[in-house]
Image (cartoon, rainbow, N blue to C red):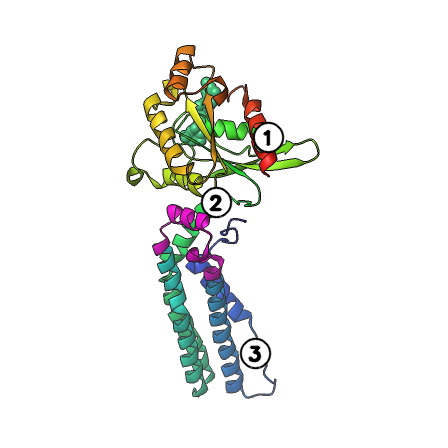
Amino acid sequence: MNNPFNQFYHVPNSQELLDIAFKRAMKSSASVSKNAPILIKAKKKEGKRIKTAIKELIDRILKIIKMVPIIEDLPDFYRELASLIVDTDKLRLTLGKLNGILPVLSQIEREYLRKLKSIETPKEADRLRKAVFGRVSSIIKKQEVNLKYLNNIRGNLRRIPSLDYSIPCVVCAGAPNVGKSSIVKEISTNKKIEIQEYPFTTKSLNIGHLHIELRFDKITIQLMDSPGILDRPLSKRNNIEKQAILALRLISDLILFVFDATPACGYSIESQINLYNEIKENFLKDRDIKMMIVFNKKDLASKEEIDFLKNQLDLSEDDYILTNALTGENLDQIVTYLKAYFQDTY
Ligand SMILES: Nc1nc2c(ncn2[C@@H]2O[C@H](COP(=O)(O)OP(=O)(O)OP(=O)(O)O)[C@@H](O)[C@H]2O)c(=O)[nH]1
Ligand SMILES: [Mg+2]
């Protein structure tokens, strides 16, 4: 399913909204006979301007509201992810406030069109229209903070990856800075993934694809890069770590767990093992999925460090893949594993 926020386009600010509405209004032309009395002409002309301005504003505000999907109606993954990225209560409230001005605008239109009927000079028609523009301006300007808020959050929501539920999704997880992004970037189509030498570089979920040729067929696998997770209770985890947990819990068909067998990543072996055990405990058992284990930074790890980690995890030689994501060494073994794993299942 495509990211439900794909259609969340630029939200105009209050001045932009007013400029468009007033410009349209001033360009509008009422249909009135050339020979009509000047007072009738003025009434028609200003009446049309008032209607056009208000219709334009109502239409544009409705369009903004409709661009934002109703969070409660989204599938679990997108709903929960959206609520980790934005304060959904605040979002709902903001949309409610924008919606709340629509009847007020309609009320102003009715009120002034009524007044327009009983005027006696063309000048009064002009004055009434200006009064409408003034009142409308102050109402729309009060929405500036709400419009700005929507525009601010849209960037993060639009970056949510589009998932295809019909093909497998492998979630790459582990402690911060172990090389998760380097691996996903190297073996998937997503070359935009950011890699840095410091932890918490990845702050959101990113998806890449891996096309695997089979003998008579080919399969595509989604590879999801996730933010690093710390070994600490869920209640202490921040919303960035929780995005990784969410992906593991809801959309992983296989978990690619990455270790750094050296202390180079900045997180102890013990804390990485605790994290591994937690994920194993919580996300494998009920869902009948597997975990593929990678020891990355092969170039930095000593034999003792690798053996120590292997023994701690009670693994044999074939249970893990030793990689160097910088040179790409052994990453083909990950692809081979995925091919073998998914070709029978999908
Ligand atoms: N020497 C060495 N460095 C590596 C290897 N793999 C990744 N790195 C480096 O380790 C650092 C972290 O790599 P990332 O791929 O950003 O790690 P990450 O796990 O995605 O990190 P976060 O997103 O911050 O959790 C970068 O400086 C990489 O160049 C490797 O196999 N060997
Ligand atoms: Mg990363």
Mark seen at residue 30: 3
Amino acid type of disc 3?
Ala
Q: Looking at the image, is mark 3 or mark 2 earlier in the sequence?
A: 3
Residue 17 drawn above or below residue 26: above
**Residue receiving disc 1:** 339
- x and y, in percent, of residue 266 in the image: 35, 23
| Magenta-drawn segment | 64-89
Q: Is disc 2's CB within 8 Å of ligand 2?
A: no
- x and y, in percent, of residue 166 in the image: 57, 45
Q: Nearer the viewer, residue 346 or 40?
A: 346
CA–CA distance in space, label 2 to label 1: 27 Å
- x and y, in percent, of residue 252 in the image: 48, 39
CA–CA distance in space, label 3 to label 1: 68 Å
**Residue receiving disc 2:** 160
Q: Looking at the image, is mark 2 or mark 1 earlier in the sequence?
A: 2
Amino acid type of disc 1?
Lys
Residue 18 drawn above or below residue 296: below
Secondary structure at numbered mark 3: loop
Which tag is nearer the camera, tag 3 or tag 2? 2
Residue at left offset 49%, top offset 53%? 10
CA–CA distance in space, label 3 to label 2: 46 Å
**Left or right of 2 in this view: 94:** left
Residue at left offset 33%, top offset 39%? 238
Amino acid type of disc 2?
Ile
Secondary structure at numbered mark 1: helix
**Residue that protrudes farthest toward the top in the picture:** 303
